[in-house]
Amino acid sequence: MQLYSTKNPGKLFSLSEAVLKGLPDDNGLFMPSEIKRLPDSFFSNLESMSFQDLSFEVARNFIGESIEEHLLKKMVYESINFPAPLVELKEGKYILELFHGPTMAFKDFGARFMAQLMSHFNQKKEKDLIILVATSGDTGGAVASGFYNVPGIKVVILYPSGKVSNLQEKQLTTLNENITALEIDGTFDDCQQLVKTAFLDAELKSALNLSSANSINIARLIPQSFYYFEAYKQLKDKSKKLVFSVPSGNFGNLTAGLLAAKMGLPVYKFLAATNINKIVPDYLETGIFEPKPSKRTLSNAMDVGNPSNFSRMLDLHGSTWNNLKNNINGYSFTDEQTIQEISRIQQEYNYTIDPHGAVGTLALEEFLQIEKDINGIVLETAHPAKFKEEMSIHNNIDIPIPQRLKEILELNKTSVTLANNFSNLKSFLLKNLT
C-alpha cells in the first residue's frame, strides 16, 4: 500500500511512514494511491461472515501486502471484538449503534486498531512514539483506552477546558501511566491547531518521534470503514437505496464511509449532519469553504470550525464541488432542534438517542421529505449515558449509567493546564518527553 499527500500527489509514502508520521511535512493529509474494489464474492458471502471476518477482508483489501496476513488478522480480531448492531426504528429507518466498545464511543474502533498498527510499525525504533492528539470529546477517551500501557508509546491529549462532558473528561484524565492530558484554555480548533503546528516544528520533530491519533491519521479511517459494511450486512432488504446519515465534526467518520463506497459498498447518498458548526453544509450549498471559530453546542464532539478531513473528501471527488455535492447532502441543526428530536425519538420509538445521533436522525428526516423508499441508517456515535446531565436537564430523561462508566466517574482527574500558546506546548513536550 502506498500513500500520497493531498498537497503533493506525486510523492509516495509507505503505510508505515504515513501511520507513524501522521501528517505529511507539507501539512496535507495522507491518502491511498489506490483504493481497490472488493470482489463480488465478498458481497455474495457477506451475510455469512462475522464482523471480524468481514473487517479482516476489508483491511486486507485496503492495506494489501504492507502487513503480513497473519499479523493483520490478529490486529483486526483483537481490536474489533465488540459488536455494531443495527437497530430498526421502523421500516427503512435504522440506528447503527457504535458505542459498544470499551469507552462507549465509535472512536474505539479507530483507536484500538491504530494502537496495534503503530505498535507493530514502531517496535524496531529506538525512540518511544509520542502520540499527540486533540479531542473535542470522545477521541481522547478512546485513544487513552486504546493506547493505555502499549509498549513504546506515550500519549499526550489536548482538550478544551470546560468544553467536554464530565464523563468524557474523566475518561481521558484518569488513566495516567503513559497517558498525559493537557487542559487547554481555548476551543477544540485551538487544540487541533496546536497539534498541527507541533508536527510542522523542526525542533520538535528532531527531538521527538511524533505521530497523531486524530482522524488526520489514515490509520483511524481504515477500521472506521469496517462498520459501514457491517451495517449493510445486517439489512434484511438490500434492494432499496442505501443512505447513511453521519453526525459530523472533523468528518473522519464520513470520510471512512466514502472509502467504503470506493471499495464497492453500494451507497446512494451520504448525509453530512452537523450542529450550528456548519462549515461543510455551507460549502455544499455555496461552493465556498470558509472555516470559522467553533461554537459550543450540546453535541460537543461536533464543535469543529475547520474540519481537517474536508481535504480528503474533496480529493476523493476529484477536488470538484459538483462531484462532492452530488454525493453528499449537508444539514445543520440547532440545540433546540436537537433537544426536541431526542424527545421525539424517545416518545415515538421508545429509543434513547444521544445529542449527536439526534442530529443524524434530524438529517435523515429531512432527506425523507425528498425520497422515501430508502434504507436510511443513522450512525449513533456515543452511548447516551455519556451525556446524562445534559439529557436530564433538557429532556427529563433518566439514563442508567453502565457499570464501566460508573467506575470511571469515581476516579480522580489528573491534567496539566496550559494556555492556548504553542510555545507553552513546545516547552512542555521538550521538558517532559525527551
Image (tube, helix red, strand yellow):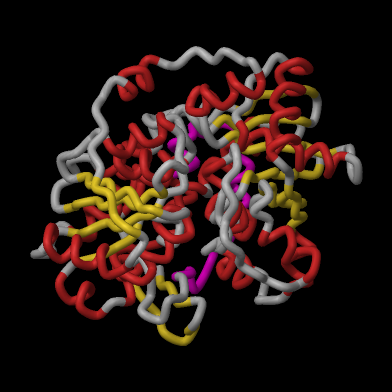
Residue 294 place in picture, x, y as percent: 57, 56
Residue pictured at 66% horizontal, 70% vertical: 290
Q: Is residue 393 above or below residue 175?
A: above
- Residue 399 in sight in this render: yes
Instruction: Provide residue 15's location: percent of width, then percent of height.
Output: 35, 66
Report the side of 82 relative to 174 (left or right): right
Rendering coords of residue 55 (x, y %): 46, 43
Q: Is residue 306 left or right of residue 411?
A: right
Q: Is residue 57 placed above or below 361 in the rendered structure?
A: below
Along the line of sight, which residue is nearer the eye, 118 or 145?
145
Task: Give the residue drawn at x 44%, y 61%.
Answer: 190
Q: Which residues are magenta?
A: 30-55
Q: Quadrant of the N terminus?
A: bottom left
Counting from the top left corner in percent of width and height, residue 341 is at: 74, 29
Residue shown at 34%/23% (left/top)?
A: 409
Query: Please, is residue 27 above or below residue 151 in the view?
Result: below
Q: Residue furthest bottom?
A: 10
Image check: 185 left or right of 70? right
Query: Residue at 66% of width from left, 76% of height from top?
Result: 319
Quadrant housing residue 27: bottom left
Tag count in the figure? Answer: 0
In the rendered image, which quarter contains the C terminus? bottom left
Q: Is residue 308 magenta?
A: no
Q: Is residue 218 visible?
A: no
| In the image, residue 42 lies in the stretch drawn in magenta | yes
